[in-house]
Image: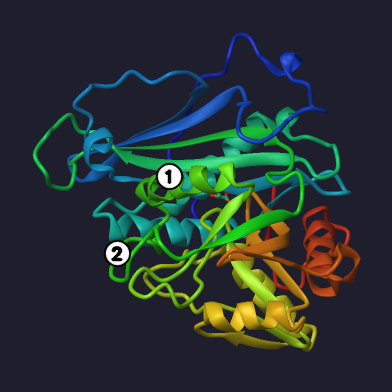
Amino acid sequence: MIDTFLIEVETTKQSRLETVDFNDLGFGRIFSDHMLVADYKDGQWVSCKIMPYGDLQMSPALAALHYGQSIFEGLKAQYTEDGDISIFRPWENHKRMVFSAERMCMPAIPEEIFIGGMKQLIELDKNWIPKQAGSSLYIRPFMFASEPFLGVRPSQEYKFIIFTGPVGNYYSEPVKLNIQTHYSRVAQGGIGCAKTAGNYAASLYPAVQGQKNGYHQQLWTNSETHEYIEEVGTMNIMIRMGNKIITPTLGDTILRGVTRDSVLTLAKEWGYDVEERKVKVAELVEGLRNNTVDEVFGLGTAAVVAHVKTIHHDDTEYQLPALEKREFANKVLDTLTKLKYGQIEDKYNWLMRI
Ligand code: COI
């Protein structure tokens, strides 16, 4: 990795750190002192600057606002026991952002800006990294079309930004899911595999309807037939039935989760039979009905490992086993937590230490 891309730095005159209650962080509403902003123009990345976090000035004709060319990533930083800062597999997020960019006709972001710039930004705002258990510094890199132009074609200008903020848990309790068999979030051949804003926009209406009925999230199914489960939108989904760890195969409609990939690696190491395949709604429901489903859990950067409490389908509410019986998801959570805090060996070289 090259760390030599020139990044200009302007530090804040007035830190806001003192105003933060680290015991009441929530998720996604507190932002650290600085952000990194890079601009793409005339076929190249022309500038990159770390500056005080603040509002952006933009044209009302900004292409992303009209036609949705906008992609993002999510990562977390925390302190290890020996005082380093660790970030979990940032190279995978960089690869995925390049993949999302290609799918959305946007330019690739160079590693020296994505990783090199992120390192510099985190070092500058290291006092914003929470020390409370379960908390971390959430890192949000994103890119959007910034050309003021209303013709429908890929923008010729882009902004890449990274900002960060201390966060607690995304879900404060085990989640209640509804299997969604009417609305769709993404479609075969579409952009579900890219981490792009529109996928989240498409999920909002059904999510809000579901929340009125007490469901935290929708478990999305394939848009053509609604026969197969796909993902939850904020996280990938995994099922344990006995010694089997089952998760839907990646394709056009499912995000390539970094946590998902890491957990499949751990499951294989621990001797589970890993099945990445199409998973029928009927198979899941049958397993819930006859108690052969031992665990269902979601995986993501923000959510980490989120136990599923209940699953609703066709007027029936299925209850999952008690949390203390979730041997796999509990072990995953424990292992990933210890790894990030540097308490166990990083045998797969997953951590970037600063
Ligand atoms: C993440 O896990 O970082 C995500 O991007 C999910 C987000 C939509 C909260």
User: Relative to residue 235, is residue 70 drawn left or right?
Assistant: left
Q: Residue at x 65, y 64 (%)?
A: 311
Quarter holding residue 143: top left
Seen in the picture, residue 40 relative to 18 is either above or below; the reply is below
Visible residue check, residue 133:
yes
The image shows residue 60 at horizontal and vertical percentages of 22, 22
Marks 1/2: CA distance?
A: 19 Å
Which of these two is toward me, 222 or 126? 222
Judged from the image, the secondary structure of the residue bearing numbered disc 1 is helix
Q: Residue at x 50, y 45 (%)?
A: 209
Seen in the picture, residue 68 relative to 256 is either above or below; the reply is above
Q: Residue at x 39, y 52 (%)?
A: 199
The image shows residue 24 at horizontal and vertical percentages of 78, 27
The image shows residue 181 at horizontal and vertical percentages of 45, 66
Seen in the picture, residue 86 relative to 229 is either above or below; the reply is above
**Label 2 crowding class (10 Å Cα cut-off): few <14, some 14-19, many 20+?**
few
Amino acid at dot 1: Tyr
Q: Closer to the observer: label 1 or label 2?
A: 1
Which of these two is toward me, 294 or 266? 294
Instruction: Mark 1 or mark 2: name the one nearer the start of the chain.
Output: 2
Judged from the image, the secondary structure of the residue bearing numbered disc 2 is loop
Q: Which residue is mark 2?
A: 190
Which of these two is toward me, 278 or 256? 278
**Label 1 crowding class (10 Å Cα cut-off): few <14, some 14-19, many 20+?**
few
Seen in the picture, residue 319 relative to 16 is either above or below; the reply is below
Picture disc at residue 205: 1
Amino acid at dot 2: Gly
User: Relative to residue 232, is residue 352 drawn left or right?
Assistant: right
